[in-house]
Image (spheres, rainbow, N blue to C red):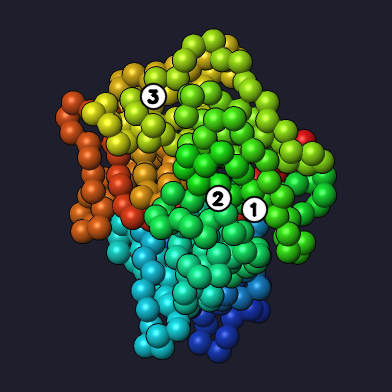
């Protein structure tokens, strides 16, 4: 509650119509501009509580949800069992050690193999099916067993992305694994899988600006179309991607698509695809000095340019975060088992075919 001075003339007496007997105004009567400034200072957990206070605050939070989520730095994600052995918690914590904890459905007997559009990708160790669960919105998708993954022992090699096809007005899960030559995809609700094979083994796949891109062991980049008929299209690029080994993965930042390699003697070389010239451009350290790169052992990372004054260096104080930067290396890299990016929970990877 906010205390208001009653001796401020006629305008104040008019406002007092909404006051209670103690001469105090309700928080819901605060000016929207003031509320917005307060809201943008909150952490994710406090934002969720803020949106549940009253109708006025809920409307403000809903209207500005995209802007709020996009401004939030990554969070560390940890999954742990509850008292009931068949229940697991998903815990998200930020660099101020604020935590958001929720029960994670369908996790028993499963393994988290990645994230896509804010959804945890939960793969059944015995059933070989998929549950996708968004810990923030609580939305879920189910996809049936895909048997070609049944023989995989190292589940971290699985690559999966969730996309939405306006052509069929449906969600599609696209799945492969490192060094496989086949991509499988399933439309939600159909309980069936289709597949498309490639001449060269696949290293990574990624949805970017309405298209699906795949990177292969011959260092070629393909565009993959799924609907109405699966089709690979080789992109003609003027120069050759510098591999530094085959542990490559896609990263994106705004309008830019990058490839990086973090498991070689030439750590963290960033190469951007110049779509105008159709060539790979090795990024200079000085040009990338304002960026922060977050990499995950589950192949889910991002390249982010913080707003001026951001204190993301505080990630180094977290016991589970490792900062690999030094005075001679830019940009800064942070590695953890799993990063969760709040803005992803509202992302939809539309593919236009």
Q: Residue at x 68, y 41 (%)?
A: 196
Q: Residues within 10 Å of mark 1 (few under 14, many from 20)?
A: many
Q: Are marks 1 and 2 in contact (CB under 8 Å)?
A: yes
Q: Secondary structure at mark 3?
A: loop
In the drawing, does residue 191 fall left or right of residue 9?
Answer: right
Q: Secondary structure at mark 2?
A: strand
Residue 129 location (% of width, % of height): 59, 65
Q: Secondary structure at mark 1?
A: strand
Q: Nearer the viewer, residue 221 or 5?
A: 221
Would you say residue 37 is visible in this rendering? no
Q: Residue at x 55, y 89 (%)?
A: 21
Measured Cα–Cα span from mark 1 to mark 3: 28 Å
Mark 1 vs 2, N-terminal side:
2
Per the image, the residue denoted by label 1 is 173
Name the image quarter holding residue 111: bottom left
Q: Residues within 10 Å of mark 2 (few under 14, many from 20)?
A: many
Per the image, the residue denoted by label 3 is 243
In the drawing, does residue 232 fall left or right of residue 97?
Answer: right
């Amino acid at each position: 509650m906010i205390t208001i001075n009653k001796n401020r003339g006629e305008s104040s007496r008019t406002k007092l119509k909404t006051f209670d007997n103690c001469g105090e105004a309700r928080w819901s009567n605060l000016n929207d501009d003031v509320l917005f400034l307060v809201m943008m200072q909150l952490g994710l957990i406090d934002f969720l509580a803020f949106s549940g206070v009253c109708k006025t605050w809920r409307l403000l939070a809903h209207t500005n949800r995209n802007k709020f989520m996009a401004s939030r730095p990554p969070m560390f994600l940890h999954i742990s069992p509850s008292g009931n052995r068949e229940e697991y918690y998903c815990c998200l914590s930020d660099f101020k050690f604020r935590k958001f904890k929720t029960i994670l459905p369908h996790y028993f007997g499963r393994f988290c193999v990645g994230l896509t559009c804010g959804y945890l990708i939960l793969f059944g160790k015995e059933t070989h099916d998929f549950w996708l669960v968004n810990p923030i919105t609580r939305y879920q998708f189910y996809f049936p067993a895909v048997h070609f993954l049944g023989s995989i022992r190292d589940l971290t090699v699985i690559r999966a992305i969730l996309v939405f096809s306006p052509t069929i007005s449906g969600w599609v899960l696209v799945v492969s694994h490192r060094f496989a030559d086949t991509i499988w995809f399933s439309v939600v609700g159909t309980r069936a899988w289709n597949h498309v094979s490639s001449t060269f083994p696949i290293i990574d796949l990624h949805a970017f600006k309405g298209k699906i891109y795949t990177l292969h062991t011959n260092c070629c980049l393909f565009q993959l179309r799924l609907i109405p008929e699966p089709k690979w299209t080789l992109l003609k690029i003027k120069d050759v991607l510098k591999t530094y080994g085959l542990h490559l993965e896609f990263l994106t930042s705004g309008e830019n698509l990058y490839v990086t390699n973090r498991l070689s003697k030439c750590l963290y070389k960033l190469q951007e695809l110049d779509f105008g010239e159709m060539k790979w451009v090795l990024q200079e350290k000085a040009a990338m000095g304002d960026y922060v790169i977050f990499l995950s052992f589950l192949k889910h990372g991002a390249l982010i340019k913080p707003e001026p004054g951001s204190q993301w260096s505080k990630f180094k104080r977290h016991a589970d975060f490792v900062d690999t930067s030094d005075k001679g290396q830019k940009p800064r890299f942070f590695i953890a088992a799993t990063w969760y990016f709040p803005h992803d929970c509202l992302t939809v990877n539309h593919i236009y075919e």
